[in-house]
Image (cartoon, helix red, strand yellow):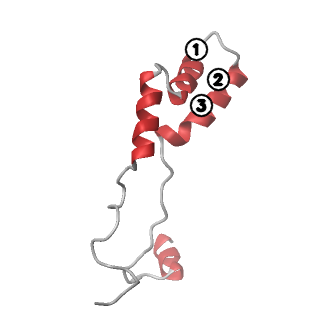
Amino acid sequence: MARGGKREGAGRPVGAANLAKVEREAAIAASGMTPLDYMLQVMRDSAADEAKRLDAAKAAAPYVHPRLSAVEHSGEMTLSHEAWLAELK
């Protein structure tokens, strides 16, 4: 039997929450309003200062709209940039 190194199927599955995270999220949810809920409430408050609303929107955005990931092109390029420009004329 080999020792050390990566073993197939060992460890916690990717994306699985650990116990501390589950407990922390449950405590936050039980307290009533989460920080994200508060930021969204400030953002939607039409009586609040515009700068305050904008800051709340900027802070909440990454939790509501995740960033797009980069995509690596794996196919073959069939048309060069120069040929594409020539076709436009």
Amino acid on which disc 2 is placed: Arg
Seen in the image, is 43 located left or right of residue 68? right
Discs 3, 1 touching: Cβ within 8 Å: no
Q: In which quarter of the image is residue 20?
A: top left
Q: How crowded is mark 1: few (under 14 residues within 10 Å), some or many (20 or more)?
A: few
Q: How crowded is mark 2: few (under 14 residues within 10 Å), some or many (20 or more)?
A: many
Can you give x and y, in whole percent of width and height, for residue 21 in the image? 44, 43
Can you give x and y, in whole percent of width and height, for residue 27 in the image? 45, 29
| Disc 2: which residue | 53
| Disc 3: which residue | 57
Q: Quadrant of residue 25?
A: top left
Can you give x and y, in whole percent of width and height, for residue 49 in the image? 70, 16
Discs 2, 1 touching: Cβ within 8 Å: yes
| Disc 1: which residue | 45
**Residue sticking out furthest to the bottom:** 1
Q: Which of 59 and 10 is in front in this view?
A: 10
Q: In this view, does 21 lie above or below 71?
A: above
Q: Is mark 1 on a helix, strand or loop?
A: loop
Discs 2, 3 touching: Cβ within 8 Å: yes
Amino acid on which disc 3 is placed: Ala
Q: Earlier in the sequence, mark 2 or mark 1?
A: 1
Q: Earlier in the sequence, mark 3 or mark 1?
A: 1
Label 3 – label 1 distance at C-alpha = 11 Å
